[in-house]
Amino acid sequence: MNRIQEEIAAVAARYIVDDGMEFGPAKRQAIKSLGLSSKAPLPSNDDIEEAVFEHLSLFGGEEQEVVLKALRELALTWMRRLAVFRPHLTGAVWKGFASEHSDIYLQLFCDDSKSAEIELINQGLDYQVSTQKGFRGEMVDALSLNIKHPELGLYVGLHLMVYDFDDLRGALKPDAKGKIQRGDAQALERLLSASD
């Protein structure tokens, strides 16, 4: 990584932690705030993730750990509530760099793609439907809710990404660096136990 990429990564990391931005928009905002050309060489997502953890080690402290644990506990509550859809946690809450600005992303693996939406209706929950890029680059339905976290006293975005059941097999494979990009309720429980 060259010096410009390091600068972009450091600024993008700040946007991710302080504003809850996703990696792509954080990179674009970093380029803009640094006054660089849109053709500037971008750091990889792995470089950004490393910069995020470095930023947290300098500025996150105990408060970030408390928020992360609270968000993971909230995610686990919803994973249990939606257990029939085989939920897997992903994103900042799974990876460990969530802040009070981070949303929770659950990937649901359904036998019928409309069943998750029907379940939310049956539970009397208000949600918004959109499409977002899935983990293989395909567009998938996302059911988004705004839920109040009782402990933190703030609203958290909960995004339920709806996949076919058959997609689960490919989802559990580690990436090229051997990292697991998502975890089920049992894996999340292990993370929570380890943090205690």
Image (tube, rainbow, N blue to C red):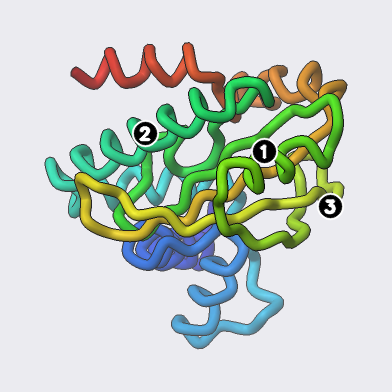
Front of the two marks 3 and 1? 1
> Which residue is identified by label 3?
139
| Amino acid on which the number 1 mark rests in the picture | Glu
Residue under the point 42% across and 60% down? 16
**Element assignment for label 2:** helix
Tell me the residue at 48%/45% (across/down).
Answer: 104
**Residue density around tag 1, few if under 14, some if 14–19, many if 20 or more, within 10 Å:** some
The answer to the question of whether label 3 and label 2 lie on touching residues, with beta carbons closer than 8 A, is: no
Badge 2 local density, few (<14 within 10 Å), some, or many (20+)? many
Q: Which image quadrant is residue 183 in?
A: top right
Mark 1 — residue? 119
Task: Tell me if 158 is positioned left or right of 112 in this view.
Answer: left
Q: Is residue 179 in sight in this rendering?
A: no
* N-term mark: 3 or 1: 1
Q: Secondary structure at mark 3?
A: strand
Viewer-side residue, 100 vs 46:
100
In the rendered view, does 148 fall on the left or right side of 195?
right
Image-based side of 147 in relation to 158, left or right = left
Q: Which quadrant of the rendered structure holds the C terminus?
A: top left
Q: Quadrant of residue 151?
A: top left
C-alpha distance separating marks 3 and 1: 21 Å
Residue holding disc 2: 72
Residue at 67 percent across and 38 percent down: it is 119
**Label 3, label 2: how far apart the Cα atoms are:** 26 Å
Q: Which x, y percent locates residue 21?
A: 48, 64
Q: Position of residue 23 (x, y in %)?
A: 56, 58
Question: Label 2 amino acid?
Answer: Arg
